């Protein structure tokens, strides 16, 4: 029996323990520094399809998303409504709490490294393997961008999410429905005071909370593909959208399957659509920062194409032909 310590009870760490559960080969325990799960700032948006990988209990679903609105410089450019369920707004703390009830977790357990050994409250970790699901906390600042968010009582249509883009700004603001009111946030390539200033233009309602965190925009961190990292600590966030919950859970599924089937995680992960699509997002962000700082070409590509195609790109469900259609042959 291999004893595994998983550090971090976010979506990546808890789902990894969930996928390993029941195996006679491994015994996993999650160690989390905070007293409860889900305290990290997040807008709680989840793309549909993830329920085929991990159960999303009904009680954790705040709303089903069936439409989206895109604004450019505060002018509405797309207002898309579909009969299909595109995603969910989940109560992420409750989702993580339910998941944590199914696995072994110890809260208030910060893992620290001293002289090449790991400790929790001065007690050394004697597990056979330690896996880091520590999110952006373990990623350098140069590989991430800031994101901030107000939680307000402003009510919007529970089935719609709104995205706000601005000429010359790489990043976007969002308004996502909450159980009551909404989450109004922004993330991008600017310092927090500038993000706050931009957000003022769309901020509505009475503010309940303000918080923020960094989001990894680097793509997959190659030297962490050794099977000791998963989730955002491995770079599994779509750089253009900042979506990290679903990719982190998928990375943990690939890691759990590799552990249980004694396969090489690096090989398995590199074969995955997730790896390929995450890296394309990161590559496009990098090229935009270097060659298109005013974001004119990126905005044109994203706003002058069929919204359904852009949606496919945004959620990582694209292929090579889609990339050529959106960005042109010269990109590839
Ligand atoms: C403002 C904002 C809005 C966002 N909105 C969305 C969204 O709507 N949809 C989406 O998909 N993604 C969103 N994201 C990104 C998403 O929150 C993350 O990518 C996702 O939570 C990553 O999951 P994870 O499990 O890898 O890491 P995390 O959720 O960051 O979990 C890591 C855990 O590890 C713990 N930890 C860290 N170090 C230690 C240690 N040394 N010892 C013990 N525990 C430790 C932390 O306390 C934390 O609980 C948003 C991010 C931000 C900042």
Image: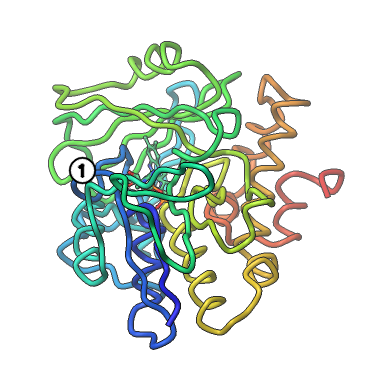
Asked whether 78 or 272 is in front, the reply is: 272
Q: Position of residue 54 (x, y in %)?
A: 36, 72
Q: Position of residue 256 (x, y in %)?
A: 48, 73
Mark 1 neighbour density, 10 Å: few (under 14) some (14–19) many (20 or more): many
**From where the camera sits, is residue 57 visible?**
yes
Quarter of the image where one finds residue 142: top right
Q: How is the image coloured?
A: rainbow
Label 1 residue near ligand 1, CB within 8 Å: no
Q: Is residue 136 left or right of residue 328?
A: left
Above or below 115: residue 198: above
Determine the residue positioned at 72% across, 53% down. Answer: 323
Ligand 1: quadrant of the figure? top left
Q: Which residue is mark 1?
A: 178
Determine the residue positioned at 14% across, 31% down. Answer: 153
Give the structural element (helix, strand or loop) at label 1.
loop
Asked whether 226 or 240 is in front, the reply is: 226
């Amino acid at each position: 029996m291999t004893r595994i310590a998983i550090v971090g009870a976010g979506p990546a760490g808890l789902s990894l323990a969930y996928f390993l559960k029941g195996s006679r080969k491994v015994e996993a325990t999650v160690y989390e520094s905070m007293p409860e799960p889900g305290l990290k700032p997040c807008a709680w948006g989840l793309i549909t399809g993830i329920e085929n990988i991990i159960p999303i209990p009904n009680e954790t679903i705040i709303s089903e998303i069936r439409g989206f609105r895109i604004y450019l410089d505060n002018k509405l450019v797309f207002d898309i409504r579909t009969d299909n369920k595109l995603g969910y707004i989940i109560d992420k703390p409750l989702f993580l709490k339910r998941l944590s009830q199914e696995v072994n977790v110890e809260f208030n357990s910060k893992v620290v490294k001293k002289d090449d050994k790991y400790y929790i409250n001065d007690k050394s970790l004697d597990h056979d393997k330690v896996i880091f699901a520590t999110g952006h906390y373990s990623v350098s600042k140069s590989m991430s961008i800031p994101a901030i968010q107000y939680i307000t009582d402003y009510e919007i249509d529970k089935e719609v999410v709104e995205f706000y883009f601005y000429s010359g700004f790489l990043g976007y603001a969002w308004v996502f429905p909450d159980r009551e009111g909404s989450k109004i946030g922004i993330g991008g390539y600017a310092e927090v005071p500038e993000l706050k200033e931009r957000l003022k233009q769309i901020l509505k309602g009475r503010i309940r909370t303000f918080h923020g965190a960094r989001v990894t925009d680097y793509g997959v961190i190659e030297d962490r593909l050794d099977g000791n990292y998963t989730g955002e600590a491995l770079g599994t966030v779509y750089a253009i959208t900042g979506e990290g919950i679903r990719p982190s859970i998928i990375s943990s599924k690939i890691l759990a399957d590799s552990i249980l089937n004694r396969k090489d995680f690096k090989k398995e992960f590199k074969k995955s659509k997730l790896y390929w699509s995450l890296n394309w997002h990161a590559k496009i962000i990098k090229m935009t920062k270097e060659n298109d700082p005013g974001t004119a070409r990126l905005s044109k590509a994203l706003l002058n194409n069929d919204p359904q195609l852009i949606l496919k790109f945004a959620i990582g469900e694209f292929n090579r032909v889609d990339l050529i259609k959106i960005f042109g042959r010269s990109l590839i």
